[in-house]
């Protein structure tokens, strides 16, 4: 089989499972924002941010290390896998036992119930351990099994959420002395979210029992040292990127304005950020499709022009998505519970921030293709530094708006710096004038819809739709794309 076709097919399978997970996660938002208070949702957001951050640390980059050494020495792949599995098993179990031991003290310090801290530690420990098991499936090209196991985990999480939020409270009314009340309160709170995730993680672990029983558990000190020497720098390099994505959620506790509880502000912020999921999904799908395409096109004579064209069309389509969401805030706000809708103003900022993050990925090809990947850490650290400064200085005054602008300016600085370095080390003829035109036109159309908004909702929706159509025509005209030709091509496609 053609290796590029195989790569593309497996990329689609791996990507699809991740995208489905994001979609399902998004559809929980209307449930959570109607069943929970803003403060409850904020507390869940804080713990989930810590989980995401610590997961990078506790996997030690061993997934990539396993790929590297197992691919290089396939005859020793089982020993390498066993060593990595033993290492992550030992560290994950040690971490979980440590948290259980000090859960009381952590509860006093954080105000989270001790049981919820233990649930979070359980999620983290199981996810870190199963990470190497999922990595082995990818190494052995078991794409279907990988997607199946991921899908079962996602579906089980959906099932546990439905069970906990809709059936358990009714059960507790009929059985007020149930032993389950030792694990979860009768009235839904953020512990229901954590328990649903933990139970789905346990299901995921159970799926791997046949493989775990088949492993000849061996540990090679020499192999372990080699794995850690290779993997730890990757973990350290990846940490700033994840920190940049989640650090503001952690900062709400320490820097949010005193006008209202920080939990409420974080809950409102996180719920509205979730509405940007359609932009996030497009950027993620683009990344899964683009990276193998970029590398496979690296030897073409016109590859730099291809990269430049991809950037231009990527920005145009992202701006279209931005307008399609940002110009109908009243409609998208209906997805949230009423008490969460006050933060809808962060949505356009986060949409633009995600466009810039996609641009950062596009620009990353210059250092990936020129073997200057050490610049990735420098670029990410710059973005993280700016995000930290903006949150520390401005969150005490502007709250969730500061958090949103922290993301936007962080990614903007990464775009500017990466573009500057690409011009210096690996020039790609990006059509910056057209890219700026599309960005500028999109923002101008959005501002026009804000400042010239009629009072009637129906009229606003109609007028904003006209604005979006005008933007589409601008792009088509600037790109010299004949709409009639597109229509004829579509008709021909249908007839075949």
Image: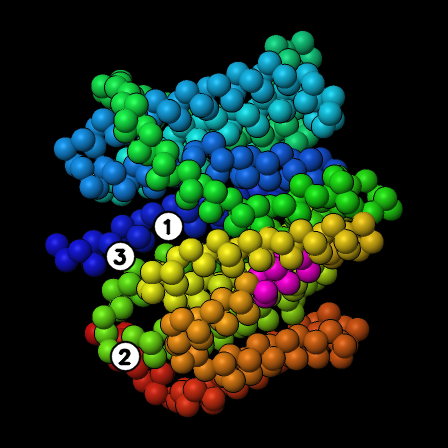
Quadrant in which the C terminus appears = bottom left
| Residue on which the image places disc 1 | 16
In the rendered structure, which segment of residues is drawn in magenta? 405-413
Position of residue 458 in the picture relative to residue 353 (left or right): right
At x 66%, y 32%, the residue is 190
> What SS does tag 2 mark?
loop
> What SS does tag 1 mark?
helix
| Residue on which the image places disc 3 | 8
At x 57%, y 42%, the residue is 28
Calculate the distance from the C-alpha at mark 2 to the C-alpha at mark 3. Answer: 21 Å
- Identify the mark nearer the N-term, 1 or 3: 3
Vertical side of 399 occupied by 349: above or below: below
| Residue on which the image places disc 2 | 302
For residue 343, which quarter of the picture? bottom right
Q: In the rendered image, is residue 308 in sight?
A: no
Does 408 appear in magenta? yes
The foreground one among 483 and 14 is 14
At x 43%, y 87%, the residue is 479
Residue 326 screen position, x and y as percent: 64, 66
- Identify the mark nearer the N-term, 2 or 3: 3
Does 130 appear in magenta? no
Q: In the rendered image, is residue 395 in sight?
A: yes
Answer few, some or many: residues within 10 Å of disc 2's Cα (few below 14, many 20 plus, some between 14 and 19). few
């Amino acid at each position: 089989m053609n290796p590029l076709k195989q790569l593309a097919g497996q990329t689609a399978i791996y990507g699809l499972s991740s995208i489905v997970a994001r979609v399902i996660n998004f559809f929980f938002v209307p449930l959570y924002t109607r069943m929970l208070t803003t403060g409850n949702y904020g507390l869940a957001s804080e713990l989930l941010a810590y989980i995401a951050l610590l997961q990078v640390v506790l996997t030690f980059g061993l997934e990539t290390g396993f790929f590297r050494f197992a691919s290089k020495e396939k005859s020793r792949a089982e020993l390498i896998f066993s060593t990595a599995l033993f290492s992550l098993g030992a560290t994950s179990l040690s971490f979980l036992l440590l948290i259980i031991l000090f859960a009381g003290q952590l509860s006093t310090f954080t105000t989270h119930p001790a049981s919820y801290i233990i649930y979070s530690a359980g999620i983290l420990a199981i996810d870190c351990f199963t990470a190497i098991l999922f990595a082995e499936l990818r190494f052995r090209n078991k794409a279907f099994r990988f997607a199946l196991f991921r899908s079962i985990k996602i579906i089980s999480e959906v099932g546990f959420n439905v069970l906990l939020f809709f059936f358990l409270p009714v059960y507790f009314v009929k059985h007020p002395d149930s032993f389950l009340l030792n694990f979860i309160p009768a009235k839904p709170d953020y512990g229901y979210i954590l328990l649903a995730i933990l139970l789905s993680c346990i299901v995921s672990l159970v799926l791997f029992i046949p493989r775990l029983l088949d492993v000849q558990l061996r540990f090679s000190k020499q192999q372990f040292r080699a794995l850690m020497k290779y993997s730890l720098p990757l973990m350290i390099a990846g940490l700033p990127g994840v920190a940049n994505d989640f650090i503001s959620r952690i900062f709400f506790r320490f820097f949010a304005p005193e006008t209202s509880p920080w939990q409420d502000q974080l809950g409102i912020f996180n719920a509205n950020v979730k509405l940007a999921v359609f932009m996030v999904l497009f950027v993620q799908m683009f990344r899964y499709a683009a990276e193998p395409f970029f590398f496979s096109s690296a030897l073409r004579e016109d590859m730099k022009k291809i990269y430049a064209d991809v950037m231009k069309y990527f920005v145009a389509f992202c701006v279209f998505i931005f307008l399609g969401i940002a110009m109908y805030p009243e409609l998208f706000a209906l997805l949230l519970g009423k008490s969460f809708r006050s933060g809808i103003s962060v949505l356009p900022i986060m949409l633009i921030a995600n466009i810039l993050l996609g641009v950062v990925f596009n620009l990353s090809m210059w250092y990936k293709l020129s073997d200057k990947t050490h610049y990735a850490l420098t670029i990410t650290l710059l973005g993280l530094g700016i995000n930290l400064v903006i949150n520390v200085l401005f969150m005490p005054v502007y709250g969730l708006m500061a958090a949103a602008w922290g993301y936007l300016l962080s990614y903007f600085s990464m775009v500017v710096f990466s573009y500057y370095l690409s011009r210096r080390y690996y020039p790609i003829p990006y059509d910056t004038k057209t890219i700026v035109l599309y960005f500028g036109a999109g923002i101008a159309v959005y501002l026009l819809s804000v400042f010239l908004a009629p009072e009637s909702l129906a009229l606003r929706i109609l007028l904003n739709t006209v604005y979006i159509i005008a933007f589409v025509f601008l792009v088509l005209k600037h790109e010299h794309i004949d709409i009639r030709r597109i229509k004829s091509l579509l008709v021909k496609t249908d007839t075949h």
